[in-house]
Image (spheres, rainbow, N blue to C red):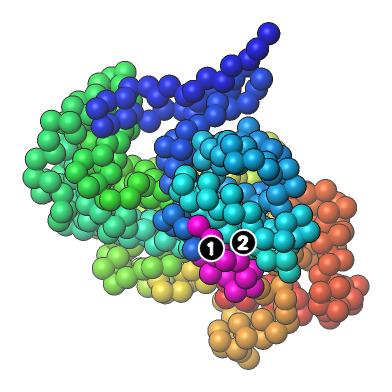
Amino acid sequence: MTCGRRAPVPRGLGVSGAFLSPPAPPDGRGNRARRGPGVAQESRAQGHTVPLSTVVGRRDLGMAALVTAGDPGIGWAVVSELADPSAYLLGGELLLTAGVNLPATASGLRDYVDSLVRAGVSAVGFGVTPVHDTVPSGLVEQCRERGLPLLEVPRPTPFAAVSQAVGAELRELHLRDLRRLGAAHQALALAVTDASPVDRVLRVLAEALGGWAFLARPSASVPGGAHRTAGAPADPGPELRGLADRLTRPRGPRSAKARVGGDEVFLHTVGTPPQEHGVVLVGRPEPLGITDRAVLRTATALLELLARTSRGAPPVPGRLVTGLLLDGGLTDASAPLLAELAAPGDDGAAEAASAPAGPAAPVPTGAPSAPAAYRVLRARPAGRGRRTAPAALPLGTRLLDAGPGEEVRALLADRGDTAHLDQLDRLLGHGWIGALSGPVDPAELPAADRRAAALLTRARAVGGPLLEERADPFDALLGPAGSDDLARRILGPLAEENDSARLLRRTLRAWLARHGNWDRAAADLGAHRNSVRYRIGRVERDLGVDLADAEQRMRLWFALTRWNR
């Protein structure tokens, strides 16, 4: 019995457009179907890759390019000495080999290079010595004929160093994408407050993706405007119109792409038929990557929100705006919106009226005046019992961020310590333990959010809600810059911005908050107690301290709670 490989069959292919579909099914041996170079190139464009020139340009590797063919993206570096490694490749790799099983004949070399090209390998790195003193000329010739980049890896450079270099470049690319994604999300969240929100969202989307954007077939509920950015075609043409028609059918796909002229055009519905409100078209010469598609999804969600709310209440995406304010980026133009959203309205009054009996501050009615200050609330479930859903909590604000996790954060207008202490007690009655920052100006909200997060850790440790003290004696001694500098010196290597340092900081904070209780700290972190012991041991070794010393624990708690990160 033989098992044949089945090529993937894209669904819904048009002349130059295609509806997005899931990956090809596995073949009879459980392997993914082998992909041709076109599919592999598309896959690499949609994932994280670094240009080959970036890897070759690293002086620490000392590699030389023997065959050049463009600047393909590298998704990873792998080592293989198999005569035909293509069955074990995904496409986009830098294949490293010392030529242990390299064919000796011209036809064998041709077949070897052909198999790598069919698998979608981006480049080959050939290590000289101990098997070959130089790169075989036959391999150079075949790679040049098939347009497969070939690199010479010098003897002093181990393959592991090449793999680590590719991994480091990929991590740096990922961090840049995260920063770009955060900036785009903040700009999109602010765009909904514009006088022409739909056009502003489209402009931000086009700028973030480096192309043009166009909202086709807008419904009557979409706020008015031009619905297109500079560079967008005045007439999308019959092919794009046909794809938009397919996307708006009740049982049709939700997204598609097409190559029109010199642009790759991506189409996505705003909402789901029959409640959809149009189709967003985004065009640029290069395909959209992972980060680009995330920005597009956020933009389409905001456009749907604007369409749903344009005839009712003002478009106020509470969760997005809350994240914007607490993560930074507040401007003077946002202040009126902040005052309106943080003040309790009719919904807040109704929720407060249904809360357990107890003294409560009166809820203002009518148009809210700008509060003098604001507070940040952090809350988590008080236990495993029943609790009120986050959206139904009596918080008196529309600025609520309740994500997929169990932690809730909210932005409240300052109403005085007494009122907020009563509010924390009511919150506990609803099954949530909370921590509330002191009153701050809008510009200080990100720092207040960090303090509330640290305070919540203490609140969970003591088993009751906490309100931040108004006067911190340390703040009287050190300003923000002085506290940050001192915290950095105390934390030492733990102040670095890498995954290892962040994990150790998070573990140390939980362990200190639990007064050295291994089991409770492990439960807070979702880790095994032995893992917590190992990490705390690393902290002691890295910092050269003994955490049995109360003064050392105090110093580290000060640094963790006052470091401006």
Q: Is residue 114 visible?
A: yes
Establish if 320 lies above or below 277.
below
In the rendered structure, does residue 56 fall within the stretch colored magenta? Answer: yes
Across and down, in percent, residue 212 comes to: 22, 52
Label 2 crowd (10 A; few <14 / some 14-19 / many >=20): many
Viewer-closest of 132 and 409: 132
The numbered dot on residue 113 is none
Q: Is residue 473 left or right of residue 410?
A: right
Which image quadrant is residue 337 in? bottom left
Q: Magenta stretch?
A: 54-67
The residue type indicated by label 2 comes to Glu
Q: Position of residue 326 (x, y in %)?
A: 46, 63
- Which residue appears farthest toward the bottom when viewing the image? 477
In the picture of the structure, the residue carrying the numbered disc 1 is: 65
542 and 176: which one is in front?
176
Q: In this view, which residue lies farthest toward the top?
A: 1
Residue 558 is at least partly visible in this image: no
Q: Are the two marked residues, 1 and 2, in contact with CB atoms closer than 8 angstroms?
A: yes
Sequence-wise first label, 1 or 2: 1
Rendered view: 486 above or below 454: below
Give how far across and how far down residue 444 sits, in percent.
46, 74
- Looking at the image, residue 375 lies above or below residue 281: below
